Image (cartoon, rainbow, N blue to C red):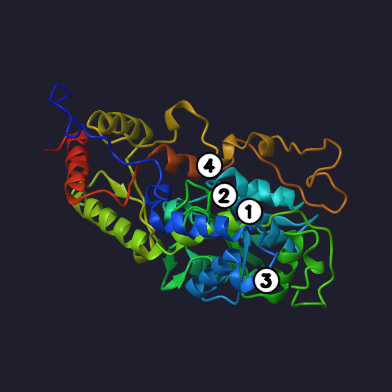
Amino acid sequence: MTTNHQSSPVRTKPWVPVFVSSEEFDDREREYVLRVIDKKRSFRFHGSQEESDAARLEKLYRDRLNVSHCLAVNAGTSALIAAMIGAGIGPGDEVIVPAYTYIATASAVLIARAVPVIVEVDDTLTMDPQALEAAITPHTKAIIPVHMKGIPCQMDEIMEVARRHRLLVIEDVAQANGGTYKGRALGSIGDAGCFSFQQYKLVTAGEGGMIATNHDIIYARASIYHDSAYGFWGLNQYPDVKLFPGENYRMSEINAALGLAQSERIDSLVSRLQRVKKRIAAGIADIPELQLQRIPDPDGDVSYSLNFFLPDAATAERFSKRLAEEGIPNGTIHNNGFADRHIYKNWTYIMEKQGASERDTPWNCASYTGNVEYSPDMCPNTLDWLSRAVSISLHQSLTEEDCDDAIKAIHKAMGRN
Ligand SMILES: *Cc1c(COP(=O)(O)O)cnc(C)c1O
C-alpha cells in the first residue's frame, strides 16, 4: 500500500449523521406524538385498546413479521429478559450467546437468572454454527443468535442445530429491524424475536422494544412478566397460565406513537440503505485484498454498515487511518480507544462473574450444576476477525456522488488510483 499522503483528501464534506432513525423525524412523528398529548392518555391499558398506539405498534409488527403475537416493551434488553422468562428459561440453565454482540444480550441472560455461554463468531461476524454446537452441554436451554449490524445470521444452520438438540432459539434483532433471511422477516424464525427501538437502531421510539412469537405460552408469560398486575387488567387471554411476579416493562403511549410513525418507514429506509451499500460494494469489488464480510443472505441485509477484512491486523490499522485521512470515518476493533462493549473480552462483570449480590449469582446458585469459564482470550477467531475488520457506517441520506467518494477514498487508501 503506497499512498500519496500529500494530496488533498478525497472528501472534505462530513460523512454520515450518527443516527439513521431520528434523522427521519418529521411531520408524521410530530402528528402521532401530538395526538397522544391531545388525547391526554399515556398509559396503554387505560381506555380502549383499539385507541392504543402500543396496541397499534404490536399489530404493525404482527403483520410485518407474520407472527401471531407481539408485545411492546420499554427496551430491547427488557424484550430479551421477558422473552427468556416467557420461554421458561431460569436458574440452572445455560444460554448460548455470540462473542460479538452488545453486552445487553449477555446481561439479559443473567437477569433471567441463567448463565451465558459465549461462542465464536465467524467471517459473517455472527454466531458460528459449529462453535454453537460444540458449546452445547446438558444444561443448555436456549440459543440467542444476534443479527449484528443488520446482517442476518446463518439461521438454517442454527435452527438445524437447535432442532436436533431440542433447544429454544431467541433471535436478538435489536440491530436488524427490517432485515430478512431467505424471504422471512428476522425475528420470526426462532421461538421468539426481540427488537429494540433505542435511538441507535434502525427506527426509534425514544426507548422501547418488542417481542414477537408464535408461541401462546411464551407470549402469555412474557406479558405477565412485563407488568406485575397484568393478570388484573382483564387482558390475559390465557387464564390457564399461572400468574407470577413481574417487573414494569410497559411501553408508554408517547413512545409507542413515535415508534409507530418510525416503523411505518422501515421498508423505505431499508431500500434506500440497500441501494447505497450495493453501489459502494460493487465499486470496491475490484480490490482483491479487501475481503467483504460474508453475508448469509445479502438480500436480507439491512445495509447500514459496510464491513470488510484486511489480510492482517496491522494492515487493517494502517488502512483505517488512511481512509479516515481521505475523509471517510471508519471503525476498527480499537474503537478510538474506548473499550467496545460489543466485544466479549470487554464484558468485565461477566468475565469476572460479578452479580449484583456477591452471595447469590446465576453462576453460584444451587440450581446450576454446570461449570462455565470465561477468559479474555477464549474466542481467538472472533478477536482475529475483528482485528482485521474495518467498518464504515452508511446512511439513507448518501447520494450516488457520496458513494463514489467512498469508493474513490477506499481505492486511494489501498494505494490504488
Ligand atoms: C441495543 C441492543 C440491545 C439492547 O437494546 P436496548 O433497547 O438498548 O435495551 C440488545 N442487543 C443488541 C444486539 C443491541 O444492539
Label 4, label 3: how many angstroms apart (C-alpha)?
A: 28 Å
Which of the pair 260/64 is nearer the observer?
Answer: 260
- Quick one: SS at disc 4? loop
Q: Which residue is mark 4?
A: 342
Question: Residue 177: which numbered mark, if any?
Answer: none
Mark 1 is surrounded, within 10 Å at the Cα level, by few (under 14), some (14 to 19) or many (20 or more) other residues, namely many
Mark 4 is surrounded, within 10 Å at the Cα level, by few (under 14), some (14 to 19) or many (20 or more) other residues, namely some
Q: Which residue is mark 3?
A: 166
Pair 2/3: label in front: 2
Which of the pair 162/9 is nearer the observer?
Answer: 9
Q: Position of residue 180 (x, y in %)?
A: 43, 67
One can see residue 138 in this view? no
Earlier residue among tags 4 and 1: 1
- Residue type, numbered disc 1: Asn
Q: Does residue 254 appear left or right of residue 238 in this picture?
A: left
Q: Is the C terminus in the top left, top right, bottom left or bottom right quadrant?
A: top left
How many numbered marks does the figure carry?
A: 4
Q: Is mark 2 within 8 Å of ligand 1?
A: yes
Earlier residue among tags 2 and 4: 2
Q: Which residue is mark 2?
A: 207
Q: Tell me if label 2 and label 1 are in contact, CB under 8 Å.
A: yes
Mark 2 is surrounded, within 10 Å at the Cα level, by few (under 14), some (14 to 19) or many (20 or more) other residues, namely many
Q: Is mark 3 within 8 Å of ligand 1?
A: no
Pair 4/1: label in front: 1
Earlier residue among tags 2 and 1: 1
Q: Position of residue 290 (x, y in %)?
A: 27, 45
Label 4, label 1: how many angstroms apart (C-alpha)?
A: 21 Å
Q: Position of residue 409 (x, y in %)?
A: 20, 38
